[in-house]
Image (tube, helix red, strand yellow):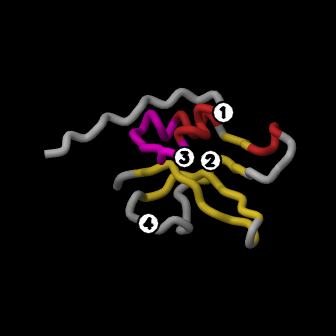
């Protein structure tokens, strides 16, 4: 099972909020997460509440081999969690 760290959209229309979670890579975007790892609310004016992360659990999943999506990688960098860049796959 390939685990991915990605966002799950919640909130109402025109007021999106996202939950960061560990998902099976084959599941749909808004499917059930293996574990919820944080919240990202781009509309929140308070920067401390805009991005809330469970750093220990995120680092656990990264050590276990979970791959973050591009957006999640940027959010983790903003949250102070170092993410190794994914190796570029060779194309023929």
Residue occupying the point 68% across, 65% down: 10
Is residue 46 highlighted in magenta? no
> Is residue 80 positioned above or below 6 on the image?
above
Sequence-wise, which precedes: disc 3 or disc 4?
A: 4
| Circle 1 residues within 10 Å: few <14, some 14–19, many ≥20 | few
The residue that disc 4 covers is 27
Give the number of the mark in front: 2 or 1. Answer: 1
The disc, 4 or 2, on the residue closer to the chain's N-terminal end is 4
Q: Where's residue 9, x and y in %? A: 63, 63
> On the picture, is 77 further left or further right than 68?
right
Which labelled disc corresponds to residue 39?
none
Picture quadrant where residue 47 is located: top right
Instruction: Identify the secondary structure beneath mark 1.
Output: loop
Q: Residue furthest bottom?
A: 13
Disc 2/disc 1 C-alpha distance (Å): 12 Å
Q: CA distance from mark 3 to mark 1?
A: 12 Å
In which quadrant will I find the N terminus?
A: bottom left
Magenta-highlighted residues = 60-72
Q: Does residue 17 appear left or right of residue 37 in this picture?
A: right
Neighbour tally class for label 2: few under 14, some 14-19, many 20 plus, Cα within 10 Å: many
Q: Position of residue 62 (x, y in %)?
A: 47, 37
Quote the CA–CA distance across marks 3 and 4: 18 Å
Residues at discs 3 and 2 in contact (Cβ within 8 Å)? no
Residue 37 marker:
2
Q: What is the number of callouts on the image? A: 4
Judging from the image, what secondary structure is the residue with disc 2 in?
Answer: strand
Query: Can you give x and y, in whole percent of width and height, for residue 49 in the image?
Result: 81, 43
Closest to the camera, between mark 4 and mark 1, is 1
Return the residue at label 3: 71
Residue depth check, mark 3 versus mark 4: number of the one nearer the observer = 3
Mark 1 sits on what residue?
79
């Amino acid at each position: 099972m390939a685990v991915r760290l990605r966002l799950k959209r919640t909130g109402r229309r025109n007021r999106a909020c996202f939950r960061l979670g560990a998902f099976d890579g084959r599941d749909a975007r808004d499917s059930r997460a293996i574990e919820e790892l944080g919240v990202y609310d781009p509309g929140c004016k308070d920067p401390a509440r805009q991005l809330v992360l469970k750093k220990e659990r995120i680092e656990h999943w990264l050590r276990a081999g979970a791959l973050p999506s591009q957006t999640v990688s940027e959010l983790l960098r903003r949250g102070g969690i170092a993410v190794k860049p994914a190796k570029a796959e060779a194309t023929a």
